[in-house]
Image (tube, grey):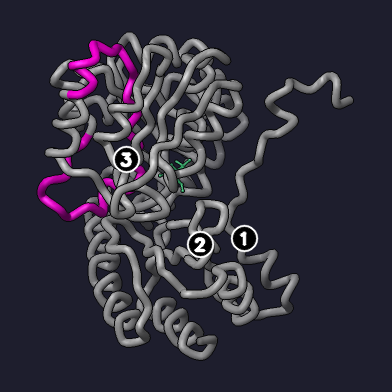
Amino acid sequence: MKDLVRKNILNFQPYIPGKPIEDVKRELKLKEVIKLASNENSLGPSKKAVSEIKKMLDKISIYPDGYCFELRKKIANIYKVSENQVIFGNGTDEIIELAGKTFLNPEDEIVVSEHAFIRYKMAGDLMGCKVIEVPMRDYKHDLEAMANSVTKNTKIVFIANPNNPTGTYNSEKEFENYYSIIASKNSGVLTFIDEAYAEYVGETDYISGIDYLKNGKNVIFSRTFSKIYGLAGLRIGYAIGTPEIISYIERIRPPFNVSSVAQMGAIASLDDKRHLGKSKQLVFEQKKYLYGELKKIGLQYISSSANFILIDMKKDGKIIFQELLNRGVIVRAMGEYGFRNFIRVTIGTQKENKKFIKEVKEIL
Ligand SMILES: Cc1ncc(COP(=O)(O)O)c(C=O)c1O
């Protein structure tokens, strides 16, 4: 069989997802388990969205609208772009992969940051191209070094803003500098900005890819319904770029990649501003609580602009992960991201966060 498999698939490292609650309950015979492992919305989905989704269920014998007409209109209107500038995916995960499949040949390069969300590197590995990993600076993407790493073979620069797992973001000033270096190189490179956690960012010098798109830059940026919108289980995300960029990716998008239920959930979630506000407020307040408690325990953490915190546990994160798991708290060990002694914890409800802190104190 091996001979039939593409060469770069033989060494391909699959994605390791957070452990599902039911698995942990079954394996460890626990009644109560909380999951703070995948940066989901701990308040759950919007109730209004759930009620709209239920109405869709009678219609699931029909294929979804592959064009996502209603949702497309809504998104185009929010960003004031044309409808042909939007693409939907089975999660942004799919769009990242589709971008790789659209643009990358084995002789090409992509530039990513060290410790960045791993799916960008995976998109490069999938296509068998060279992945240039640029070291971080202060746990942040070093945009200057990334721009300087662009060569004539570079097709895509992937930037997570904010990044998972560090929770750090890059400022407008850093992006300005990045684009001036790219311009000085006369490079036509595509910048893919992943903004999965943008809604959580409170800093005023944060800038979205939409501004650069409107400035005529070669950019595509993505957003997801999996995080603040609480629809991770439905799998839906979108990206916005120039009509030309989108048209090429659209060519290879599977025809019915986004379910009708997901489309309805997304439309209704966008309308529920109250749920969005509550979700943001919870993360804002609970982040403060967690920072305070971590300081009291004497643990260092990376200041986060998203709904999770990367914490230095001062010993192997895998051990801490397992000990927390035994106590019914699922977090993520960060070894695979190059942070051996760190865990990443999603900011949960007050009750969940208190339980997490209590268990950490007992373990240490
Ligand atoms: C930075 C980042 N981008 C994209 C994703 C994938 O999101 P989606 O559920 O939309 O595929 C994640 C999920 O953890 C993420 O952290």
Decide which of 356, 74 is in the foreground and name it: 356
Magenta span has 182?
A: yes
Mark 3 vs mark 2, CA separation in Å: 19 Å
The local secondary structure at tag 3 comes to: loop
- Horizontal arrangement in the rendering, residue 82 relative to residue 2 (left or right): left
Q: CA distance from mark 2 to mark 1?
A: 7 Å
Quarter of the image holding residue 75? top left
Residue at 62 percent across and 60 percent down: it is 20
Residue type for callout 1? Lys
Ligand 1, seen in the image, is in the quarter at top left
Q: Which residue is mark 2?
A: 37
Task: Please give the name of the residue rendered at 50% of the width and 42% of the height, measured from the top-left corner.
Answer: 118
> Is any part of residue 138 visible from this angle?
yes
Asked whether 209 or 116 is in front, the reply is 116
Q: Which residue is mark 3?
A: 195
- Front one among 231 and 26: 26
Judging depth in this view, the residue of 309 and 33 nearest the camera is 309
From the top left corner, tell me how far across and down residue 22 is, in percent. 66, 65
Q: Which mark is residue 19?
A: 1
Write down the region rendered in magenta: 181-208
